Image: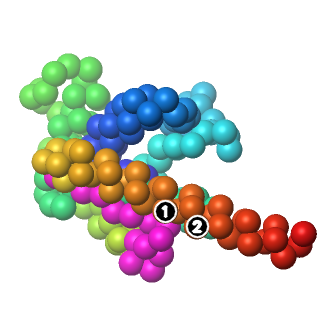
Amino acid sequence: VSFPRSGHHMAVKLMSNAFEASNQTWSYCEAYQAGNSCTDEHTVRKSHDFQLTDPVIPSQVYVVLVRRSRFRQLESYYRFNCKYAHQTPYPQDCSVSVREFFDSNRIFYSLFYHKWYSKSQAEPERVRLVFYEDLVDRPLLSLVGILDFVTEAATRRASSTAGLEDVSG
């Protein structure tokens, strides 16, 4: 899960390189784009949780990408929206002023951050916040943290499943 412009594609590239280097496979999906749908076969799914309705499913783990600074987060999102809306390189005149954009998106950002921060505190074994600034400043350390988090979750899931099998067998 990522707030737009929080380093999602950088994180995906880092993970892709790690999986390729170790001869492991993984499957990536961007379900929110038209024509795309994710299945259980996709091991990594992208979501921006625009409606703030993404549930925390017990069998899944969530890496949530955000920036530490709300201002920097919204500024980057504003630049992207101006570029995307006009299909021209930034800086171009945008149809929405910076003030209007910030006013209309600051509440969404606050709700998004609060939702996922709260979940990361309540369920640290299933939800991990990763900051854009850490991805940029320390990409290898960030990647190791993400992979350790996912590996620990998979190990817990496998051991709890094995325990159930032992009881029923």
The amino acid marked with disc number 1 is Glu
**Distance between the alpha carbons at the discs numbered 2 and 1:** 6 Å
Q: Which residue is mark 1?
A: 152
Q: Amino acid at mark 2?
A: Arg
Q: Position of residue 5 (x, y in %)?
A: 27, 43
- Which residue is the site of mark 2? 156
Is there CB contact under 8 Å for labels 2 and 1?
A: yes
Q: Nearer the viewer, residue 148 or 84?
A: 148
Q: Which segment is the magenta one?
A: 120-133
Q: Does residue 123 belong to the magenta stretch?
A: yes
Of helix, strand and loop, which one carries label 1? Answer: helix
Q: Check the picture and name the quadrant holding the C terminus.
A: bottom right
At 24% from the left and 56% from the top, the residue drawn is: 131
One can see residue 56 in this view: yes
Residue at 63% x, 36% y: name it.
Answer: 37
Q: Position of residue 87 (x, y in %)?
A: 26, 20
Q: List x then y, in percent, for residue 29.
A: 54, 36
Q: Quadrant of residue 117?
A: bottom left
Return the residue found at the far left: 91
- What residue occupies the far right of the structure in this picture? 169
Answer with the quarter of the image where residue 69 lies: bottom left
Q: Does the magenta-highlighted stretch encompass residue 152? A: no
Above or below, 112 against 163 in this view is above
Answer whether residue 74 is visible to the viewer in this image: no
